[in-house]
Protein backbone atom coordinates (compact mmCIF):
# COMPACT_ATOMS: atom_id res chain seq x y z
CA UNK A 1 0.00 0.00 0.00
CA UNK A 2 1.36 3.38 -0.94
CA UNK A 3 0.97 6.59 0.96
CA UNK A 4 1.35 8.69 -2.16
CA UNK A 5 -1.79 10.18 -3.54
CA UNK A 6 -2.52 8.97 -7.01
CA UNK A 7 -3.34 11.61 -9.64
CA UNK A 8 -6.95 11.54 -10.79
CA UNK A 9 -7.61 9.48 -13.86
CA UNK A 10 -8.47 11.75 -16.75
CA UNK A 11 -11.58 10.76 -18.61
CA UNK A 12 -11.41 11.15 -22.36
CA UNK A 13 -13.34 14.19 -23.47
CA UNK A 14 -16.64 13.21 -25.04
CA UNK A 15 -17.24 14.59 -28.46
CA UNK A 16 -20.35 16.74 -28.70
CA UNK A 17 -23.05 14.55 -30.08
CA UNK A 18 -25.51 16.90 -31.77
CA UNK A 19 -29.15 16.06 -32.31
CA UNK A 20 -30.35 12.53 -31.54
CA UNK A 21 -32.07 10.80 -34.44
CA UNK A 22 -35.73 9.84 -34.17
CA UNK A 23 -36.29 6.29 -35.48
CA UNK A 24 -40.05 6.92 -35.68
CA UNK A 25 -39.54 9.13 -38.74
CA UNK A 26 -39.27 5.87 -40.67
CA UNK A 27 -42.88 4.78 -41.33
CA UNK A 28 -41.84 1.15 -41.86
CA UNK A 29 -40.15 1.06 -38.44
CA UNK A 30 -43.20 2.68 -36.86
CA UNK A 31 -45.57 0.12 -38.41
CA UNK A 32 -43.37 -2.81 -37.34
CA UNK A 33 -43.28 -1.44 -33.81
CA UNK A 34 -47.09 -1.03 -33.79
CA UNK A 35 -47.51 -4.68 -34.79
CA UNK A 36 -46.34 -5.78 -31.34
CA UNK A 37 -46.91 -2.73 -29.13
CA UNK A 38 -50.15 -1.48 -27.61
CA UNK A 39 -51.41 1.98 -28.55
CA UNK A 40 -50.52 3.71 -25.27
CA UNK A 41 -47.07 2.12 -25.12
CA UNK A 42 -46.40 3.05 -28.76
CA UNK A 43 -47.36 6.65 -27.99
CA UNK A 44 -45.03 6.67 -24.97
CA UNK A 45 -42.13 5.31 -27.02
CA UNK A 46 -42.66 7.84 -29.80
CA UNK A 47 -43.06 10.66 -27.27
CA UNK A 48 -39.79 9.69 -25.59
CA UNK A 49 -38.01 9.68 -28.94
CA UNK A 50 -39.50 13.06 -29.87
CA UNK A 51 -38.40 14.47 -26.52
CA UNK A 52 -34.85 13.19 -26.99
CA UNK A 53 -34.49 14.44 -30.56
CA UNK A 54 -36.30 17.76 -30.01
CA UNK A 55 -37.73 20.07 -32.63
CA UNK A 56 -36.24 19.80 -36.10
CA UNK A 57 -36.93 23.45 -37.05
CA UNK A 58 -37.05 22.53 -40.74
CA UNK A 59 -40.19 24.46 -41.71
CA UNK A 60 -41.35 26.61 -38.81
CA UNK A 61 -44.14 28.55 -40.55
CA UNK A 62 -47.42 26.65 -40.20
CA UNK A 63 -48.46 27.68 -43.74
CA UNK A 64 -45.51 25.94 -45.41
CA UNK A 65 -44.68 22.96 -43.16
CA UNK A 66 -44.83 19.83 -45.36
CA UNK A 67 -45.95 17.64 -42.45
CA UNK A 68 -49.12 19.73 -42.06
CA UNK A 69 -50.19 19.64 -45.71
CA UNK A 70 -53.06 17.22 -44.98
CA UNK A 71 -54.25 19.32 -42.06
CA UNK A 72 -54.25 22.58 -44.05
CA UNK A 73 -56.71 21.03 -46.54
CA UNK A 74 -59.27 20.03 -43.87
CA UNK A 75 -62.44 22.14 -43.78
CA UNK A 76 -64.01 23.04 -40.44
CA UNK A 77 -66.45 25.84 -39.70
CA UNK A 78 -66.86 26.32 -43.45
CA UNK A 79 -63.20 27.13 -44.16
CA UNK A 80 -60.06 25.14 -44.73
CA UNK A 81 -57.23 25.66 -42.27
CA UNK A 82 -55.24 27.15 -45.15
CA UNK A 83 -57.95 29.78 -45.72
CA UNK A 84 -58.15 30.49 -41.99
CA UNK A 85 -54.42 31.06 -41.79
CA UNK A 86 -54.54 33.35 -44.85
CA UNK A 87 -57.26 35.44 -43.18
CA UNK A 88 -55.19 35.65 -40.00
CA UNK A 89 -52.22 36.90 -41.99
CA UNK A 90 -54.44 39.53 -43.65
CA UNK A 91 -55.65 40.65 -40.22
CA UNK A 92 -59.39 40.25 -40.89
CA UNK A 93 -62.02 38.74 -38.58
CA UNK A 94 -59.70 38.72 -35.58
CA UNK A 95 -62.55 37.81 -33.22
CA UNK A 96 -62.86 34.44 -34.95
CA UNK A 97 -59.21 33.37 -34.85
CA UNK A 98 -59.37 31.56 -31.49
CA UNK A 99 -62.50 29.48 -32.33
CA UNK A 100 -61.12 28.69 -35.79
CA UNK A 101 -57.89 27.34 -34.37
CA UNK A 102 -59.54 25.49 -31.47
CA UNK A 103 -61.61 23.48 -33.98
CA UNK A 104 -58.31 21.93 -35.09
CA UNK A 105 -56.86 21.58 -31.59
CA UNK A 106 -54.54 24.53 -32.19
CA UNK A 107 -53.98 27.06 -29.45
CA UNK A 108 -52.87 30.63 -30.14
CA UNK A 109 -50.08 31.24 -27.63
CA UNK A 110 -49.29 34.76 -28.74
CA UNK A 111 -50.32 36.99 -31.62
CA UNK A 112 -50.03 40.57 -32.81
CA UNK A 113 -53.56 41.80 -33.55
CA UNK A 114 -52.46 45.14 -35.10
CA UNK A 115 -53.92 45.25 -38.62
CA UNK A 116 -51.08 46.56 -40.81
CA UNK A 117 -48.34 44.53 -39.11
CA UNK A 118 -47.20 40.92 -39.22
CA UNK A 119 -49.09 38.52 -36.95
CA UNK A 120 -45.96 37.02 -35.37
CA UNK A 121 -48.24 34.35 -33.92
CA UNK A 122 -47.07 31.33 -31.97
CA UNK A 123 -49.46 28.46 -32.60
CA UNK A 124 -49.40 25.29 -30.48
CA UNK A 125 -50.69 22.14 -32.17
CA UNK A 126 -51.94 19.50 -29.76
CA UNK A 127 -50.23 16.17 -30.48
CA UNK A 128 -51.53 14.28 -27.43
CA UNK A 129 -52.91 10.77 -27.63
CA UNK A 130 -56.56 11.87 -28.00
CA UNK A 131 -55.99 15.08 -29.97
CA UNK A 132 -58.48 16.45 -32.50
CA UNK A 133 -56.23 16.08 -35.55
CA UNK A 134 -55.22 12.45 -34.99
CA UNK A 135 -58.10 11.21 -37.17
CA UNK A 136 -57.01 13.39 -40.12
CA UNK A 137 -53.63 11.68 -40.29
CA UNK A 138 -54.97 8.23 -39.38
CA UNK A 139 -57.53 8.36 -42.22
CA UNK A 140 -54.72 9.29 -44.63
CA UNK A 141 -52.56 6.39 -43.37
CA UNK A 142 -49.84 8.59 -41.85
CA UNK A 143 -49.24 6.77 -38.59
CA UNK A 144 -46.02 8.47 -37.54
CA UNK A 145 -47.36 12.01 -38.02
CA UNK A 146 -46.21 13.24 -34.60
CA UNK A 147 -42.58 12.57 -35.44
CA UNK A 148 -42.98 14.23 -38.85
CA UNK A 149 -44.57 17.33 -37.31
CA UNK A 150 -41.81 17.45 -34.67
CA UNK A 151 -39.23 17.66 -37.47
CA UNK A 152 -40.87 20.80 -38.89
CA UNK A 153 -41.84 22.73 -35.75
CA UNK A 154 -39.77 25.34 -33.95
CA UNK A 155 -40.30 23.89 -30.45
CA UNK A 156 -41.70 20.82 -28.71
CA UNK A 157 -43.45 21.19 -25.38
CA UNK A 158 -44.11 18.03 -23.38
CA UNK A 159 -46.17 18.16 -20.19
CA UNK A 160 -45.65 14.96 -18.23
CA UNK A 161 -48.69 12.92 -17.17
CA UNK A 162 -50.07 13.11 -13.65
CA UNK A 163 -52.50 10.89 -11.75
CA UNK A 164 -55.46 12.80 -13.18
CA UNK A 165 -54.26 13.94 -16.61
CA UNK A 166 -52.46 12.25 -19.48
CA UNK A 167 -49.32 13.49 -21.19
CA UNK A 168 -49.79 16.65 -23.25
CA UNK A 169 -47.56 17.27 -26.25
CA UNK A 170 -47.52 20.45 -28.31
CA UNK A 171 -45.67 21.39 -31.47
CA UNK A 172 -45.08 25.14 -31.68
CA UNK A 173 -45.17 26.81 -35.09
CA UNK A 174 -45.01 30.42 -36.21
CA UNK A 175 -47.38 32.30 -38.46
CA UNK A 176 -45.49 35.06 -40.27
CA UNK A 177 -42.33 33.50 -38.96
CA UNK A 178 -39.65 36.06 -38.10
CA UNK A 179 -36.86 36.48 -40.64
CA UNK A 180 -33.64 34.75 -39.73
Image: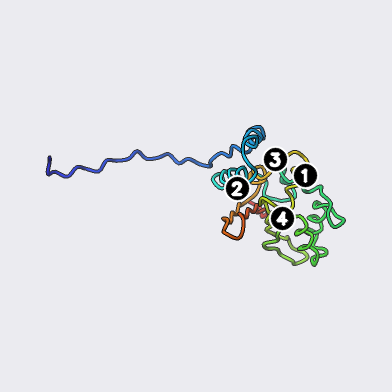
Quadrant (top left, top right, bottom left, bottom right) of the N terminus: top left
Q: Quadrant of residue 166?
A: bottom right
Q: Earlier in the sequence, mark 3 or mark 2?
A: 2
Q: Nearer the viewer, residue 146 or 120?
A: 146
Task: Check the image and report above or below for 73 versus 85.
Answer: above
Residue 146 in the image: state x and y as whole percent.
66, 45
Residue 73 shown left or right of residue 170 in the figure: right
142 or 17: nearer the viewer: 142
Secondary element at image label 4: strand
Q: Indicate the quadrant where residue 36 lies.
A: top right
Of 162 and 70, which appears nearest the observer? 162
Other-residue count near label 4 (Cα within 10 Å), few / some / many at <14 / 14–19 / ≥20? many
Sequence order check, earlier mark of 4 and 2? 2
Question: Which mark sits nearer the N-terminus, 2 or 1?
Answer: 2
> Which residue does the image show at 77% across and 40% down from the upper left?
140
Task: Using the numbered discs, state the Cα–Cα distance from disc 2 to disc 1 in whole angstroms.
Answer: 20 Å
* Contact between labelled residues 2 and 4, with CB atoms less than 8 Å apart: no
Q: Are there few (<14), some (14-19), or many (20+) residues within 10 Å of tag 3?
A: some
Residue for badge 2? 55
Cα separation between marks 1 and 3:
13 Å
Q: Nearer the viewer, mark 4 or mark 3?
A: 3
Which x, y percent locates residue 75? 84, 51
> On residue 175, which mark appears?
4
Q: Which residue is mark 3?
A: 143
> Disc number at residue 70?
1
Q: Is residue 49 left or right of residue 115?
A: left
Q: Residues within 10 Å of mark 2 (few under 14, many from 20)?
A: many
The nearer-to-camera label among 4 and 2 is 2
Q: On the rendered structure, is 73 left or right of 145?
A: right
Check if mark 4's residue and mark 3's residue have beta carbons within 8 Å: no
- Looking at marks 1 and 4 on the same chain, the residue that comes earlier in the sequence is marked by 1
Amino acid sequence: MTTKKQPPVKQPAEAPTGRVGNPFLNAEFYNRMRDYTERDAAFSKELKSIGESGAGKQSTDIRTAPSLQLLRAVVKKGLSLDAMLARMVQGVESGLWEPWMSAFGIEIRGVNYAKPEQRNARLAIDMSLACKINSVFANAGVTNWRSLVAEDCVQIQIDKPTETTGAKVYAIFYLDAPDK
